[in-house]
Amino acid sequence: MLEQRKKDILQRLSYEEYVKVSDLAATYGVSQVTIRKDIAELAEKGLLVRYHGKVSLASAAPIPFSQRQDSNFVKKQRIAKMAVELIEPGDSVMLDAGTTTTMIAEQLVDRQPMNIITNSLSAANCLDKSSHTVTLLGGILLSRSKCTVGPVTESEIAALECEKVFIGCTGARGTVGLTTGVVLEAMVKKAMISAAKEVIAVFDDSKFDHAGVNLFADFSQINTIITTSSEKSKPFLDELRKKGIHIILADEF
């Protein structure tokens, strides 16, 4: 029973951004002291993190959006500048939620008017005073990522199509595919990929071999990767080129 409860806690956290300790205790009909022992054991194994009476998967720990945006800022900015060069007049574009895609939105502000679809509150806010037609997708607000997720978001995406989607990730699982830390975010990313004629992944070299728990795209689904180079990423990029993926190294321009 004890081991099953721990498995259930991890399963629930794969679908939710965080869960309150009090809610877990109520769900399983045990005291908070008992549930905290379970949490402590899982935390010691590096599977989850605790903060302010809540728990989250370690791979989805709540790093503030502003802090993530500051991380590798110059690399992300170069990637964003390269990304907008791929957009052609008349394109309709989807922007995934993330720090790099928010920077793409910033680069698009003064561009020729186009249709832009996003689930990112940060991207939509950047484009507020632009001349673009911006569609902000509805759904459940995921505060850590400043985005909308869930069945409503997915159904709205399913009714749309676009020329290009720009997708970020928590990490790349070897040369298998792209991952994220929260199932609900993974489902939205999958829907966006299905709605686009061309899929462009945008992430810096720190994401290679730094996988999240939820695989949302096989590399065979990705047309182009815009990234940066390092000794760590070179062998992965060489293998991905062999798979026929167009690789653009933003730090070479």
Image (spheres, helix red, strand yellow):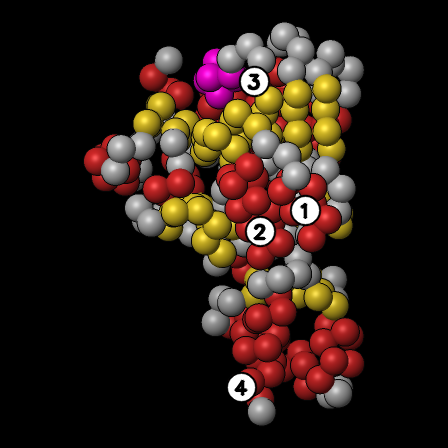
Mark carried by residue 237? none
Q: Is residue 142 visible?
A: no
Q: Is residue 165 above or below residue 154?
A: above
* Residue at 59% over, 36% down: 96
Question: Mark 2 vs mark 1: which is more N-terminal?
Answer: 1
What amino acid does circle 3 point to?
A: Asp
Q: Categorize mark 4 by other alpha carbons within 10 Å: few (<14), some (14-19), many (20+).
A: few
Mark carried by residue 91? 3
Q: Is residue 47 above or below residue 196?
A: below
What amino acid does circle 2 point to?
A: Met
Q: Is residue 223 above or below residue 132?
A: below
Residue underneath mark 4: 3
Q: Which residues are magenta?
A: 81-87
Question: CA gap, disc 2 to disc 4?
Answer: 28 Å
* Residue at 54% over, 78% down: 7
Question: Mark 2 vs mark 4: which is more N-terminal?
Answer: 4
Residue underneath mark 2: 187
Question: Mark 4 vs mark 1: which is more N-terminal?
Answer: 4
Give the structural element (helix, strand or loop) at label 4.
helix
Q: Is residue 8 magenta?
A: no
Q: Are marks 2 and 1 in contact (CB under 8 Å)?
A: no
What amino acid does circle 4 point to?
A: Glu
